[in-house]
Amino acid sequence: MKPAGLYIHIPFCTQKCRYCDFYSITQKAGFAPYHPNPQFIERLLHDVRFFKERSAIEAWKTVYIGGGTPSLLHPDDISTLAAGIRKEQHLPVQEFTIEANPEDIHPEWLAACSEGGINRLSIGVQTFDNDVLAVNGRRGSKEKTITALNTIKSRWHGELSCDLIAGLTGQTAASLSGDLQRLIDYRIDHLSLYGLCSEAPLPEAREDFISDLLQQNIELLAENGYIRYEVSNFSYQDKHRSLHNQIYWNMEPYAGIGPAACGTLIHEDSGGKFIAAERFEGSKDIGEWMTAADRTSVYPCEHIDRNIFLEEVLLMGFRLSEGINRPAFARRFGADITAFIGNTLSLWEKRRQCRIETDRVYLTEEGLLFLNRFLIDALSELDTKAQYPAGKPLDLDG
């Protein structure tokens, strides 16, 4: 298999933030925050080797260590993990990212990251407002975040991305724009601005408030040179896009290692035609994940057929400002995208919310505001066509 992305999940947190729905463990015997945890690191590296050999992955194109809270790892564990991942790489890792909470940043931790070949930090700022942090169960403070950013500015030579959330409980329009302006003033390389997600539906008034917050601050980012290349992601002067996340959005192969980590390995022929896809998810029972001798048992596999894969290509690809590449889509599925959702594309183009160009189709800035509505229309058209392209049927299960 061609080079793939690698996602590593570090599930440990000191406390659970009220808005977070990622898998995490707040208390676990055997894991000590900020102390060496060599057994956990070795198990991760064993599984990295297992997946690489099992799927004949040529190399890791990108690596992303997320969580949970990877910044709870001791510097020695970061060094061991990074060195183990890079071992036997015939090609350099193009982008090696680790997530961190601001309050965990210190010079020794940054040095371990740098020496291990990690070249990108993703800092979960979320907000600088102490009252908002407290009501949402988030540890840290405005003062600690500012200290962390100053430490990074003076000691870190790689790229820096920061996350903010719009719609947190207690947040105002003024506090969010102030948070954003502070990060703009630091001239960080990359910024992610997410709307609050919730398992339970939010009241319509709050949904509208969040939508307004996002739109106002997207304009502020654009005015300061941050180019929107995905619904929630912005690159300064368009020079710092996340290579790893583009693997997800372009539906390229990646392995997911760790408890609850997801990965999708995609098989295509030499011409780029889709053959098959497998999705793996690590066990959420960390005791089982740590001790099971049969590693296939803790990474159960789901086979993704061509129909589902096509839907996912649409769901992910239209998140990108550049949209979906038409020649690549045709190579994968045997027909141009207009053969599948041509009516939807034409309708949205007439509204000036979509563009159909020779090499790509994409939503305009206005169209991205209604992404969910567009996707509903597109998937509904797939259903009415029984997922056949215009003209003769295409065997989507062959």
Image (cartoon, grey):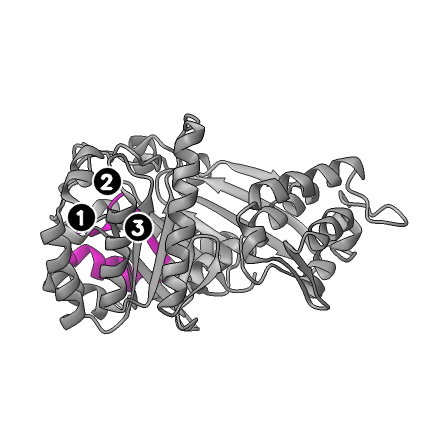
Mark 1 vs 2: CB contact within 8 A: yes
Task: Determine the residue positioned at 60% across, 45% down.
Answer: 312
Question: Could you tell me the amino acid type at mark 2?
Answer: Phe
Which is more foreground, mark 1 or mark 3? Answer: 3
Residue 25 location, quadrant: top left
Query: Is residue 15 one of those drawn in magenta?
Result: no
Q: Label 3, on which residue? A: 164
What residue did someone put label 2 on? 12
Tell which of 320 and 128 is nearer to you. 128
Q: Name above or below for residue 183 compared with residue 215.
A: below
- Percent x, y of residue 64: 36, 56
Say which of 85 and 325 sits in front: 325
Q: Which badge, 1 or 2, is on the more N-terminal residue?
A: 2
Q: Residue at 34% across / 66% down in the picture?
A: 87
Tell whether position 80 is magenta: yes
- Checking the image for residue 72, the label placed there is 1
